[in-house]
Image (cartoon, rainbow, N blue to C red):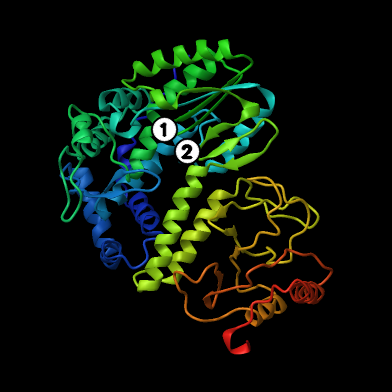
Amino acid sequence: MRRRRFGDLFEQVASLGNLFAAAKKALRGRGLKMPAVAFAADLETEVVALSHELRSGSYRPGAYHYFEIFEPKRRLVAAAPFRDRVVHHAICRVIEPIWERRFIADTYACRPGKGTHAALRRARALSRQYPWALSCDIQRYFPSVNHEVLMGTLTRVIADERLLSLIRLILASHVPGDHGAGGAVVPEGEAGSLAGGTGLPIGNLTSQFFANVMLDPFDHFVTEVVRPGGYVRYMDDILVFGQSRSELRAIGTRLRDRLAGFALNIHPDKYRLTRTAAGVDFVGFTVFADGRIRLREKSLKNFRRRYRRLLAGVKRGHVKPASVTASVKSWVAHARPSPQRATPGGPAWQTPQVGNHCLRAGGPGWRAVGGMTGSSRGLRGGNWNNNAFNFVLQQEHERPVEREQQQRFSSRKPLQADAGPIWWSPGGFFRPLRRQRLVSGTTPTARAARISRLSHRTGQVKHRPDEA
């Protein structure tokens, strides 16, 4: 059956209503950054000018600002001018709903209602059903995307030539060897891959969307032609499940051949056939057949390094404590494989350790130290409740009795890089008890009293220097 092609989309993209909505979305989370503030200060004039440029054909993308990031690995990021980001949002607002209806259910990257945790839940369900899994990764996916192959996929759905010309203009704006003021030059290896109309700039909203569009025919090929036991994709991370090793070997050969038709290659070092009982690596976690989800050691090491660097920055005054808090809370939210809150008597999801610290995120309805009961099995297994150094994130609503206990046995001196384990509270960083057990009680007062008795009985109270 021939699928419908969509025309008259360009006028929707260039309409004032769509551009105002796109500008509002692009401004979200930008804070007081100057390009966003300057655009918002003269919003009506900027949006009307953009609409006129798009309709007249005089619109041209600005120069990118390039910079490098090194977590989790070295990547070159291209930051487009703010007005170009508004155009990117305007395009995606129009064509994304069309493609959402075409995407398969089991692709999870950069899609509404999907994400890393949803992909993990799906992978965990399939790991319980199938004894074998094939995991693979596309080698240098974003720099390897061929523009002609991508445009061919887009043309099969979009019939509006003016919109297709605008998309070609955006793809061609990522110039090999280009650099912004003070930005990093495109590395030699990437510049070579970009020559001849290949490569998507990491950092563009359109790049994330086009990366999904590029692999949409591949997704349909796997699920409708190959038909394995299970299939999950998160951007360029691919998982295929089956009943036997030989079955997955044959499927792997077909996947390689199909990707070669898109001018893409599977990374030779990330092509693995494993038993699900031994654990399957996926999106930074290891998923086991018995339902356990473990955070990969590499992810922990990366965060430990970043965390130590942030603490050193706080000591030197280069980093605000609020930035450390935001970074830790963001990472903890990622590290929790289940977004559901722990319920009384239910499983207490363990948050992975960072150095000698155990991280737990606070939030509405969450309990602070001494408040969570039930099993301690979680990401890394074992009992973490008696860990010697607990790093606890607490919110404004934490119980006054528990806060009093923390302040009573803690030094409120400014953070020192070598001060050992620390806690965070809305008032800032401070040093906690050297060892504190997670206990349960019927009321906050009972729990606090039991904590006090336990600490004095085991000789683990850490007095302030003026109390010695």
SS label for mark 1: helix
Is 117 or 31 nearer to us in this picture? 117
Q: Position of residue 133 (x, y in %)?
A: 57, 23
Which comes sooner in the sequence, label 2 or label 1? 2
Name the residue: 61% across, 45% down. Answer: 337
Would you say 303 lies left or right of 231 here? left
Name the residue: 33% across, 31% down. Answer: 140
Name the residue: 21% across, 55% down. Answer: 49
Res 311 → quadrant: bottom left
Is 158 or 324 nearer to us in this picture? 324
Is 244 or 434 nearer to us in this picture? 434
Q: Report which residue position mark 1 lands on.
A: 212
CA gap between label 2 and label 1 equals 8 Å
* Position above or below: 343 against 402: above
Q: Position of residue 118 (x, y in %)?
A: 58, 40
SS label for mark 2: loop
Callout 2 amino acid:
Ala
Is 150 or 398 nearer to us in this picture? 398
Res 110 → quadrant: top left
Q: Residue furthest bottom?
A: 466
Q: Report which residue position mark 2 lands on.
A: 109
Q: Are marks 2 and 1 in contact (CB under 8 Å)?
A: yes
Q: Determine if residue 37 is in view.
A: yes
Q: Position of residue 171 (x, y in %)?
A: 24, 36
* Position above or below: 464 against 273: below
Callout 1 amino acid:
Asn
Position of the C terminus, as image quadrant, is bottom right
Would you say 249 lies left or right of 341 here? left
